[in-house]
Amino acid sequence: MKFKEIDAFRAVMRSGSMTAAAAALHTSQPNVSRLVGQLEASTGLTLFTRAAGRLAPTEEGLAFLREVDRAFVGLHALKDAARNIRQFGKGRLRIGTVPSLAMTVLPLVLQRFHADHPEVTVAMDTGSTQLVADWVDSRVCDLGLVSYLPPTAVTEARPVCDLAGCCVLPPGHRLAAKAVIDAADLAGESFISMAHGDGLRAAVDGAFAEDDRRVMHFETPHGATICRMVGLGLGVGIVNPLVARLYRHTGIEVRPFLPRVPFVSYLLLARNRPANRLVDRFNGLVEAVIAAESAGLSG
């Protein structure tokens, strides 16, 4: 199977005829016909039916086109990557992050970074903690920000934030009268939990290990979703205070929680990474912004 054969097949499928495909490829109609015939022979597929001089794609041909189109998407991505390298050189950053940090501190970091480096393009991808770690380890991303240390982490994992989880309550909840919420207070309460397998789930559950009488109605991987559900009166939860602050406008009540549940954020960097001043500059701003945001949580 050769690229020219696949290109000819795709052109015929797009144009609807050998003649139009030949014109699009700047070649002859017999050459296109020969290439398509070779592709059918090499794949063992019947890609077209031929009747009265007209071509019609078969079910096999349509199925094969879907796979070909997927491959061409990958080729176009490579072309885009080459163009970006030509255009930006090293002036480009790709960041992997979990949603909670993408919605809280990262926009502030990007604001400051762009003011200092307006010529630099920054792309941000969001995913689970493990997925972000994989992106960094394989160098799909230049750096990562995660909300707990993944089981298979990259060599460089730097803690940049350690905050105490807070309790979020629906508007007008009976526990809003308390200055501090403890684990025993949540006995019998509908509890919106982090998802199983999430490192933060284990940390939160550990606070209730001795006498867990929560009613486990819901679970979700995102602290933002917990806050939204709490605002709708579906239960209570323990979340990162940076995330909780985003949802105060919904009327939720936010209180300190005991025992302390650590919400630690980590900066991930690839093994043996080459020196990159843009990455170093961005890392410094991440730490500065998180420090400033954390200091502003009181009250």
Image (cartoon, rainbow, N blue to C red):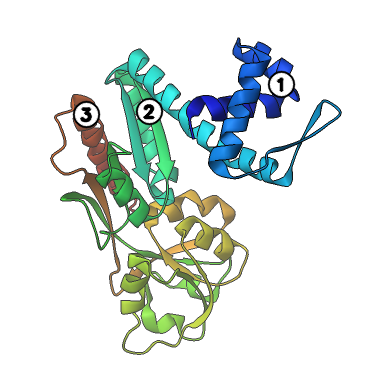
Graded by Cα atoms within 10 Å as few (under 14), some (14 to 19) or many (20 or more), the crowding at tag 2 reads few
Q: Nearer the viewer, mark 1 or mark 2?
A: 1
Q: Find numbered disc 2 in the image and state the secondary structure of the residue it sits on.
A: strand
C-alpha separation, residue under disc 2 versus residue under disc 3? 13 Å
* Mark carried by residue 93: none
Quadrant of image for the C terminus = bottom left
Return the mark for residue 18. 1
Whole-angstrom CA distance, mark 1 to mark 2, is: 44 Å
Say left or right for 34 vs 203.
right
Label 3: which residue? 281
Above or below residue 239? Residue 43 is above
Can I make out residue 69 in this image?
no
Residue 122: which numbered mark, if any? 2
2 or 3: mark nearer the eye: 2
Mark 1 neighbour density, 10 Å: few (under 14) some (14–19) many (20 or more): many
Q: Is residue 171 above or below residue 108?
A: below
The earlier-in-sequence mark between 1 and 2 is 1
Expressed as whole percent of the image width and height from the top left, the position of residue 70 reads: 55, 38
Looking at the image, is mark 2 or mark 3 earlier in the sequence?
A: 2
**Identity of the residue furthest to the right in this view:** 52
How far from the left and from the top, in percent, is residue 282?
26, 32
- Element assignment for label 3: helix
